[in-house]
Amino acid sequence: FARNITERYTYRKEIEGVNKLITTILDSLPLAIGVKSVRDDFRYVYFNAEAKRVLLKIAEDVVGKTDFDLFPGSDFPYQVRTKDMLAIEKGIYSEYAVPFTGPDGAEHIMNRLHIYVNNPDNPQIVSVFWDVTEQHNNQVELIKEREKNSLKSAFLSNISHEIRTPLNAITGFSELICEAETLDEKSAYKQQIGENNERLLNLIDDMLLMSEIDSDMAELSFTRVPVKTLCNNLFNRFSGKEPQGVTFTFDSGDSPECILLTDELMLERVFIYLLENAFKFTSRGAVTLSYQINTEHETCKTVVLTVSDTGIGIDPAYSEQIYEQFFKIEKYSQGPGLGLTLAKRIMHLLGGSIWFESREGGGTLFHAKLPLS
């Protein structure tokens, strides 16, 4: 007997060609695709090339197995099964920018789709996931760059205002000194010019230091620094410069002399900022400089230096914002300028920490802690 099967053979060849085309397309896509049979305990019936690459599996290791077989002793199969069930319930379940740790330990950001294909004879779940780590990182970098540009604009706006204020004073009093008729007037104007010159020079110095710290170019020179001597130097520097109605004291208490291994000029700069702010916001009462040795931990002794004042205080709600550049509670009120921002960054460079205790209207205590050598 003979039968002409040319048509059937041609049809089979066409099916094989279509299957090969589909397989080639699926294996060429940058999408990891896996297909599971719902009625056969969610066992895999298909796994494309990208899925093999992402999960470091080959088809022979995957087809016919469940997620529980492939990832034993892990929470991952339970998470996947939950998403598969949600796909059955909703028809499709999607996730975007999901953290994923690959079998090789590499961290990725993935988008995932779980699609329910409701074939009456063979319902299936199609899992599709693709790596968006690079796009995610680029987007994060773009956001950071925009924030950086926004901060730069705000900084330039603030710094231009801070520079104009002493410059205007210098220009104004320079004109007035030329027109002054008495020596007392000239002396007063000269004093104002000198004070604003110093203010402008300090501001430029602070800007340069901020730039060095931001670009990791700040140079530190660690030496053995006696704490009591450092505090005495600060006391002598500010003694006699306190506002009228404010007393300034150095309270050494019972704390003995101790030695810090630190950058003396940088640490001194921190307390210049703290003392200047204390005098700026204290109209009456006292400003006190003190230190205390903390010996609670024998293996890690520390010293805490404190600047306390009886000034206007700080609302605890501003515990973080107070360290921002040119932060002001009110637009037309005084702010700490760059001082507290630099103080916090310098303490970080020195391996220490800074914090404050205060209540609005009740004075402030700024503490700086460093390990003893």
Image (spheres, rainbow, N blue to C red):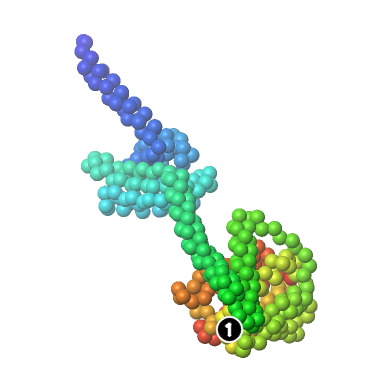
**69, above or below 28, in the image:** below
212 or 367: nearer the viewer: 212
- Image check: 354 left or right of 32? right
Which residue sits at x=39%, y=32%?
A: 28
Q: Position of residue 113 (x, y in %)?
A: 34, 46
Residue 306: name its quadrant: bottom right
One can see residue 363 in this view = no
On the question of residue 246 being in view, the answer is: yes
Q: Secondary structure at mark 1?
A: loop
Q: Identify the residue at image location x=51%, y=63%.
A: 160
Which image quadrant: the C terminus? bottom right
**Residue at label 1?**
282
- Which residue type carries mark 1? Thr
89 horizontally vs 339: left or right: left
Residue 360 coordinates in the image, percent (x, y)? 51, 83
Task: Return the x and y of residue 97 as percentages of the image width and height.
Answer: 41, 51
